[in-house]
Image: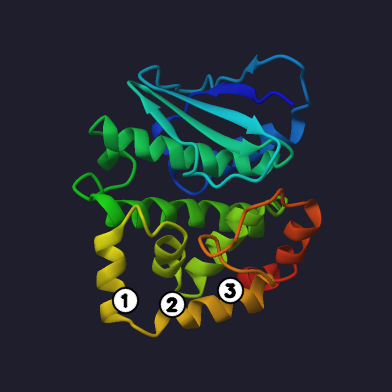
């Protein structure tokens, strides 16, 4: 199956964990599959200075795995059948693009000066807030990578989630984390295995396609986030 490409522009105020979720999830709820690319543009106050593109894939993909930033355009891949996940994936790509363009403070105040692991933590924390809002307020359908993110964040394991899944990207932060909190990784792994009945990303021998039942299993714990 070929990946499908969708286009969209994001308005500044919408990256807060409210209006963009409403707009994005509502749009996703009414979209139908198409054999050719279709353009989706937010006309209300669109910002023509950048473009966010989502590429629909067959398999599960984490937002950072196939992120591409080229000039004023960001491309991010998302599993095609997970329509509700499109909005937070776009936000992830958008915030990284704004960092590249020197405009991140417009959307995430105080974050423009951040680099490396600290930048990634700030961006994923925002994405987690957006997804939690969508799941608890708008009944967005579960999507396993985002479920892992919000539960890790809400349980105090965001650092562990990032550094365990991406050790080669942030080696200095990983070494510092292991030195300062030597018992946290083992605690995180045990917590993740209990919560998701699987190894955390970064420790799996190989990633295979995750079927809908996996996301449904993760959804069983959603009540904790709702409370």
**Whole-percent x and y of residue 57?**
66, 34
Query: What residue is shown at x 65% (from left), y 79% (from top)?
Result: 194
Q: To which residue does mark 3 refer?
A: 192
Residue 89 position in % (x across, y down)? 53, 41
Give residue 94's quadrant in the image: top left
- The residue positioned 63% from the left and 53% from the top of the image is 207
Q: Are marks 1 and 2 in contact (CB under 8 Å)?
A: yes
- Secondary structure of residue under mark 1: helix
The residue at the point 45 percent across, 21 percent down is 46
**Label number found at residue 178:** 1
Q: Which mark is residue 28?
A: none
Which mark is drawn over residue 185?
2
Q: Is residue 85 above or below residue 23?
A: below
User: Horizontally, is 134 left or right of 9 in the view?
Assistant: right
Quarter of the image that includes the C terminus: bottom right
Q: Is residue 95 left or right of residue 217?
A: left
Q: CA distance from mark 3 to mark 1?
A: 18 Å
């Amino acid at each position: 199956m070929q990946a499908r490409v969708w286009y969209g522009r994001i308005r500044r105020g919408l990256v807060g964990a409210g209006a963009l979720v409403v707009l994005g999830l509502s749009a996703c709820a009414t979209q139908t599959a198409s054999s050719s690319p279709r353009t989706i543009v937010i006309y209300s106050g669109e910002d023509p200075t950048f473009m966010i593109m989502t590429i629909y894939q067959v398999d599960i993909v984490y937002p950072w795995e196939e992120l591409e930033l080229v000039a004023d355009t960001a491309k991010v891949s998302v599993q095609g059948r997970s329509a509700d996940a499109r909005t937070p994936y776009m936000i992830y790509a958008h915030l990284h693009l704004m960092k590249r363009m020197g405009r991140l403070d417009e959307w995430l105040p105080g974050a423009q000066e951040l680099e490396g692991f600290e930048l990634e933590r700030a961006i994923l924390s925002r994405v987690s807030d957006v997804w939690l809002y969508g799941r608890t307020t708008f009944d967005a359908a579960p999507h396993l990578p985002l479920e892992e993110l919000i539960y890790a964040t809400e349980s105090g394991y965001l650092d562990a989630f990032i550094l365990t899944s991406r050790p080669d990207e942030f080696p200095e932060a990983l070494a510092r984390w292991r030195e300062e909190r030597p018992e946290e990784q083992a605690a995180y792994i045990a917590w993740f295995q209990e919560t998701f009945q699987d190894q955390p990303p970064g420790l799996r021998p190989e990633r295979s396609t995750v079927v809908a039942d996996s996301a449904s299993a993760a959804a069983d714990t959603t009540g904790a986030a709702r409370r």
